[in-house]
Amino acid sequence: MAPPTEHLEKQPLLSHPSHPRQGFGIHSLHKESVFSHKLEPQRQTSLSLRAKIILGMVAIPAYLLASSAVTTLGPLWPRDTVIRSAEPESESTSTLTDPLPNPFSSVAGPLVEQNFPDPAIIVVDGLSYAFATNNRGKGADMTWTLLDHHDALPSVGAWETGARVWAPDVVQVDDGSFVLYYADEVVWSPSHHCVGAATSTNILGPFIPQEQPFACPDVMAQGGAIDPDGFLDTATGKRYVVYKVDGNSIGHGGTCGNTVAPIVPTPLMLQEVGPDGVSLIGGAVQILDRDDLDGPLIEAPTLHRSAEGIYFLFFSSNCFTTPKYDVSYATATNIYGPYTRSSRPLLITSDADLVGPGGLDIVKGGDMVVFHGHMTINNDPAELQKAKAISASTGTPVKDVALPLIRGMWSGTATFSGTGISLG
């Protein structure tokens, strides 16, 4: 169990470096009417149907994990960033009265103001469904309703504990059915995860888990696996799953468990699958690994192929508990690479007033992206009020007050051009 938040350091060293969360649920929000919102007790092995979200014209039911506030973000000064190379000098002839375009003008949010990390999105029959790690509360112009007694994943496989089910992603396969990819603790080493898969004929489940893990690198030697994401390459008709080898779970200490030498690799792996989304074709292939600028890890991979035939591999780097967490990307002309990192991450702290953005996903075949960011005293009045109250009672400066880590959901519209991408 994680220690109480009041005993945590501002940049904590977590016993497990990834995203703490328990149990899946489905939430929905209705813009048209107001309902009370009440969370039911946490359950270890179930995916609970909770609600439906309407954002403007888009309805987004969401799979979530029950909130577990086990870490704090820490101070945001200075705002560390990761820039791989200097941005080229602008050749614009703009004057002070002709400002440059905002490269993040499409970014909107927070659409969900409380815990909604690592969102994934899928469109089914014209309806967009967002799946995420956990959630509670409401976003702007949205209120919650609660639909009880619906378990999307009522049971788990014999290989898994069901106690820490993480990072869901759902795809629709050729026959119209659905595959849920996720990570869960393995029974033989509960401090480590492997990737599982479950199937259903309905987007809301129930999903039936496979008897064996989908991907399970040696948990003691490599760290297991987390953060699966399904991808259909429309150019070839082939299906893939990309995931992270969770090497920092066996790291030697430091930030997110992996900044003390020797640093353990956290590679992103690509596995081809059959039309059913679960039958393995060949072995997994490494397509990217962390480097020194990535800090302790890379994780949360997502693939997209642009209309120009460029493969974009999105991922997050650095530690999710810090402002250095980001949305990065690399590009290639072949799905297996080699992938070349962009000179600058797509999103870093201070872009669009975000803090620690990460976990990006993109609508398959579309241009809508969703991602999470930290809710802080700078972007959430509720967090500011909490910090002020603690400051008044303890004498701690407001900017130094340690609050539980909460990640809301933002969205944006992506425009691809060559190996570049803009959210303007």
Image (cartoon, rainbow, N blue to C red):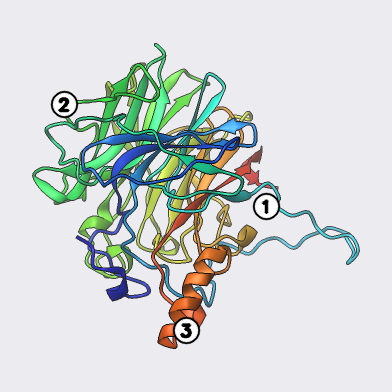
Counting residues from the N terminus, which is met first, the one under dot 1 or under dot 2? 1
**Image spot of residue 366 (x, y percent):** 59, 30
**Image spot of residue 159 (x, y percent):** 13, 35
Does residue 228 show up? no
Secondary element under disc 2, as helix, strand or loop, is: loop
Counting residues from the N terminus, which is met first, the one under dot 3 or under dot 1? 1
Pick the front one: 228 or 122? 122
The amino acid beneath tag 1 is Phe
Q: Is residue 354 left or right of residue 280?
A: right
From this view, report whether residue 16 is shown above or below residue 125.
below
Pick the front one: 51 or 230? 51
Q: Which mark is residue 392?
A: 3
**Residue at mark 1:** 104
Secondary element under disc 3, as helix, strand or loop, is: helix
Q: Is residue 403 left or right of residue 197?
A: right
From this view, report whether residue 75 is shown above or below residue 38.
below
